[in-house]
Amino acid sequence: MNSLNLLQNIQGIINNIYPFYSSSSLLIVVFILLFFINFGKKAFKIFFLIISFIGITAAFFINIFSFLKNGTFSNYLFNYDLVEVVMISLVLFIGLNLLGLISFFNFYKKNFNKILILFLFSITIFIFFIASSNFLMLFSSLALTIISIFLLVTSLNDELPYKITEEYILKNYILRFFLVTVFALSLIFLGFSFIYGATDLKSFAQILEAEKISNSMAKLGIFTLFSSLFIFSFIFPLQSPYIKLLKRCESSSAAVIWFLYYSTVIFLFLKMRNVFFYLITNSTTNAVNGGASAGNTANTSASLNSNILSGSINNIYNNISINNIYITSFLFFVAMVCLIFGNLGAVKTFSTRRILSFIFLVVLGFSILSLGFYSIGIFNESVLVFIIFSNLACLILFYFPYSLILFEIEKANGNDRINSFGNFSKDSKDYLIYNFYNSFNGKYILINLVLAAVSFPLIVLFNAILSKDGFLKIIRLVFLSVYTVGESKENMQNALNKYFSLNNTFIYLGVIILSVGFIFLMYNLIRVAILMFKNKKLENLKSSDKFSDKFSDKPSDKLGDKTSDKNNEISAMQPLQHDYKNQEKVQDNIQDNFKFKKQKSKKDKDIFPKFYYAYITIFNLVIIYLLIFNILQIFNINILPFEIGQIIGKF
Amino acid sequence: MNIQYLSIFSFSIALAGICTVSIVKRFLSIIISIQLVIISAIVNFYCYSLFLYNLSGWDKIFVFFAVIVLYMLLFLAVFYNYLKQTGIYEIDSLSNLNLFMCTKSDWWGEDKD
């Protein structure tokens, strides 16, 4: 009887903690690991790693299956629906990949166990943030997520083999980055105070239901919130702290900022998405018809779709309306700045970290561009949410293997300049890299990089215009003359009268921005892949006469440029290199780690572990599969086991 | 004291905080500027609660939790700064931390700083 009561009590507790099964499982893992936090032996570190991996994997499956079993959940503080399930799944998938990345680069650190516990804790808090709906819960969990990311980044950047001055510079850039975040958080706090003054309501859903958003103070609050989101995301022209930190920080902490920090920003926007949709659709300027008729974007999109299918051009143009011209203009402008300046910044630099950081902002620019396309009625809310998710998923699929290769080569090479990769001295480590470049494995990596570099921008392009529907709409609207073949003369005339309307200008502008951004992005990614492997053998032969001169401990001597002045200049640009020989403050365990890697590399004649190849291949296959899926969607061929439109409709 | 004076007061504090945070470059000045924005939000909450919502309890709970987490983050930043001190006044206290300062290298070319 007692055991029955106990079971009933346990079942009651389990029922009460829904929808936090995934975060509870992670908290249990954290609790178990706390007992072993001070055990620094290798066996305990492996134990930590395995338990963390099991915990995150279990949380991933529990999250999905519990939702399928119990369905949606909503109360005063939390909301758990399909969008939240997708967000949590994405975060847990990011967590699995980050776990690997953190382990690769920090396994031999003394604080490895603490880092893993902080990492698991930050994912747990993140799940709370995703599920929160009330302002109180939203703000507290958001701030706690940022705190845990701050602690994680600072821990990852601890115990590095840097000189004191380099460590000091890094500390300043970490502080600068997170002070901007604190400032954005305080602005969010201020925004909530305005909203409270205007409405006395406690969540975005309540404000929209009560239709109190038209109040000027509520608008001020919403404006403050979106401004803080802009500051949060370090979009141009506020990119300085982000770019500077990413250039210098420890490798895995760069991935933490890309995927944990930026996921927070993207999910915060998704939490405010209904407010954004309301602002877009309920302050309409119908530019095409010159009237002020209010338009509902969802209806507009639906009717647009039917008109395109029925082939009536006049109807297409009559139904597309610009929703709030100021917001639309702003969105297109920000997207343009992100795409153009992000790509330009990446074109000019040889630092792989800077290139990846800029390209991340470019992909954010693609997402912002899709917001602009939404505001002119190309697609509806569900599609927009789907696009934002798929952009994030593509970033995860592309960035993890790509950055892993680049970080590992950077570690072996001593700096992150792509034009210096594979300029070799007689150092055995350099010979290993040289052998790698000329081996089958090196060529395999190159092929993978090029394939990913071609596929990734194409998928992002498809995402931005949403494969079939968006693609066809834009193509038909842009190439009007082609489409009008077979139309009556009157219809053609009417359509052409609207040819240079404001709405059409936005469509053309969007397509131009999209095309330029896409071409630039593809160029940048292929450039990285090609530069890494370009003429390495030839350069080696040319420089072989100077081998004895070049062999030096100074990082600048390995850069391989023609003049020593140039080398010195470049060296000055590399303030924080992993200079293992001249370091003043090296931890013993880091030394051991380096020696271990070196010995292993000598034996295997390979700079990557075997696991890397499987990892890179799997991710690349998924990217290529997605690309083929997107292309076939245009021709109405579905290669997925389910209909993608049905999934989109549920968002 | 009425709602107008308090609103103007809090709005001016917020503006002062936002303006100074984008200008100043010392760590302490930035922390103080951020606190001005936080104080402005707190004044707003109490002002609206007092004059509009008959001293409701929700705002106090919100302010309590929000201030705890915000100050925890600020404290962590200060503590991290303290832990990584070099002991040289010129380096520790006079470093440029301007949050929104952009150099040419942030847009174009290599990072020379």
Image: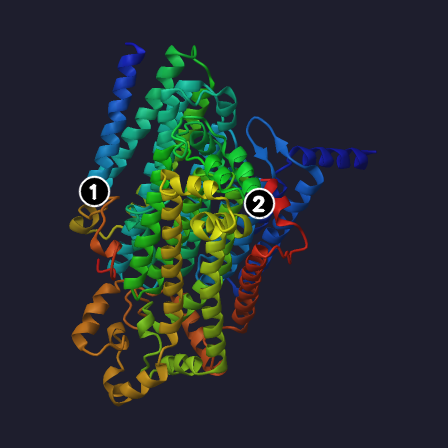
Specify the color scheme: rainbow
Asked if the residues shown at circle 1 and circle 2 are in contact, with their CB atoms under 8 angstroms apart, the answer is: no
Count of marks overlaid on the render: 2
Quarter that holds the C terminus of chain A: top right
- The mark lying in front, picked from 1 and 2, is 2
Kind of residue indicated by mark 2: Leu
Residue A454, percent from left and from top: 46, 65
- Cα separation, mark 1 vs mark 2, equals 61 Å
Secondary-structure class at tag 1? loop
Q: Is residue A608 above or below residue B28?
A: below
Determine the residue located farthest toward the right in the rendered image: A1
Residue A575, percent from left and from top: 25, 63
Viewer can see residue A307: yes
Kind of residue indicated by mark 1: Arg
The residue that disc 2 covers is A309
Determine the residue located farthest toward the bottom in the rendered image: A545
Q: Is residue A135 above or below residue A498?
A: above
Of residues B4 and B33, the one nearer the viewer is: B4
Quarter that holds the N terminus of chain A: top right
On the same chain, marks 1 and 2? The answer is no
Q: Is residue A332 above or below residue A186?
A: below
Of residues B2 and A384, the one nearer the viewer is: A384
> For this view, does A173 lie left or right of residue A9?
left
Tag 1 subunit: B
The residue that disc 1 covers is B26
| Residue at (26% x, 54% y) in the render | B106
> For this view, does A98 lie left or right of residue A637?
left
Of residues A447 and A243, the one nearer the viewer is: A447
Tag 2 subunit: A
Rendered image quadrant of residue A422: bottom left
Residue A517, percent from left and from top: 37, 55
